[in-house]
């Protein structure tokens, strides 16, 4: 469902993503790991069509993001690193607005909003203004917005960043459940999320894949049973600026 083929991105002389290839099938949750500056967000921005690649392509459900971005984007729900929210709207008002942007109308719009609210456990705050929500609920509102058009592919950039342990647990469970029906690519710095939510993970460093496997394969590769040890072994410690 997600086919990343030889994707590269230069920012001036800086090579942020270097000939990256991987696939994510339906029913897979791929964890995208790597140190700060490894190229995770840049890869996700290219896969979702927010920035053009310098080389390579990403196909979403067989549709090229380079050749046919408008159609490819309809297949994706994207949660960017700093997702925008309209603070003076209520949760339900915001989601209805997002559904309209997705060209949903009438009962299809209302059904989509209701389902997203239920899926993301937002029923209790649906009529509350966004600026009065806790960080966890704001986060789940952002996540709900990615689900409105029932996309086959979800791209989530650090979806549990800044949440407390209970909220992290809930979002991971949600990702796991959604992953049964969709193809999910999500980036994280939290290594325990690999075992908690992913069917597979890749580690990138300086724009290249340096490890790829199921959680148990990666743990076996570490030699010590610790994903942290593997991460430290295959990545560089000096963070790119
Ligand atoms: N618009 C840009 N212009 C110039 N350089 C950029 C731009 N966006 C990203 N970079 C550089 O590309 C590299 C990869 O950045 P990216 O944000 O993709 O990393 P990341 O793995 O998502 O990091 P983090 O975990 O800190 O979010 C970094 O060196 C970054 O400074």
Image (cartoon, grey):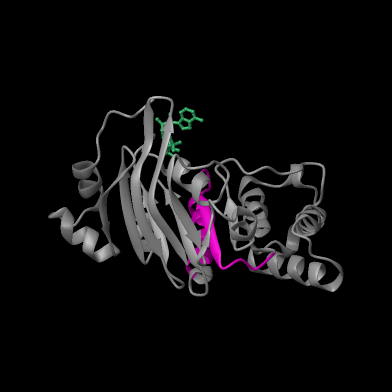
Q: Which image quarter has ligand 1?
A: top left
Image location of residue 18, percent across then percent down: 33, 41
Could you say which is closer to the camera, residue 163 or residue 204? 204
Viewport quadrant of the C terminus:
top left
Residue 100 visible in the shown view:
yes
Residue displayed at 59% across by 56% down: 68
Image location of residue 164, percent across then percent down: 52, 48
Could you say which is closer to the camera, residue 2 or residue 181? 2
* View extreme (front): residue: 67
Residue displayed at 47% across by 55% down: 58
Residue 197 visible in the shown view:
no
Picture quarter containing residue 35?
top left
Could you say which is closer to the camera, residue 62 or residue 185? 62
* View extreme (right): residue: 106
Looking at the image, residue 186 lies above or below residue 12: below
Q: Is residue 169 magenta?
A: yes
Looking at the image, residue 113 lies above or below residue 101: below
Could you say which is closer to the camera, residue 50 or residue 83? 50
Residue bounds of the magenta highlight: 149-176
Residue displayed at 84% across by 66% down: 105
Image location of residue 14, percent across then percent down: 38, 28
Image location of residue 47, percent across then percent down: 50, 51
Q: Is residue 204 magenta?
A: no
Q: Is residue 198 left or right of residue 133?
A: left
Q: Is residue 220 left or right of residue 53?
A: left
């Amino acid at each position: 469902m997600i086919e990343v083929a030889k994707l590269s991105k230069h920012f001036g002389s800086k090579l942020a993503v270097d000939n990256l290839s991987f696939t994510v099938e339906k029913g897979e949750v791929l964890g995208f790991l790597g140190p700060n500056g490894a190229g995770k967000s840049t890869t996700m921005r290219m896969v979702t069509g927010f920035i053009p690649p310098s080389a390579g392509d990403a196909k979403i459900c067989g549709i090229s993001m380079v050749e046919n971005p408008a159609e490819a984007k309809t297949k994706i729900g994207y949660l960017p690193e700093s997702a925008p929210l309209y603070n003076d709207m209520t949760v339900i008002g915001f989601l209805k607005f997002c559904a309209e942007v997705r060209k949903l109308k009438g009962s299809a719009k209302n059904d989509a909003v209701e389902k997203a609210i239920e899926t993301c456990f937002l029923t209790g705050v649906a009529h509350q203004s966004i600026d009065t929500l806790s960080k966890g609920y704001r986060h789940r509102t952002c996540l709900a917005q990615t689900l409105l058009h029932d996309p086959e592919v979800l791209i989530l950039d650090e979806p549990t960043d800044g949440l407390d342990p209970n909220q992290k647990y809930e979002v991971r469970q949600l990702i796991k459940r959604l992953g049964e029906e969709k193809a999910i690519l999500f980036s994280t710095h939290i290594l325990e999320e690999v075992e908690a939510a992913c069917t597979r993970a890749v580690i990138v460093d300086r724009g290249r894949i340096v490890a790829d496997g199921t959680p148990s394969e990666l743990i076996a590769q570490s030699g010590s049973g610790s994903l942290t040890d593997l991460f430290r072994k295959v990545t560089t410690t000096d963070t790119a600026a």
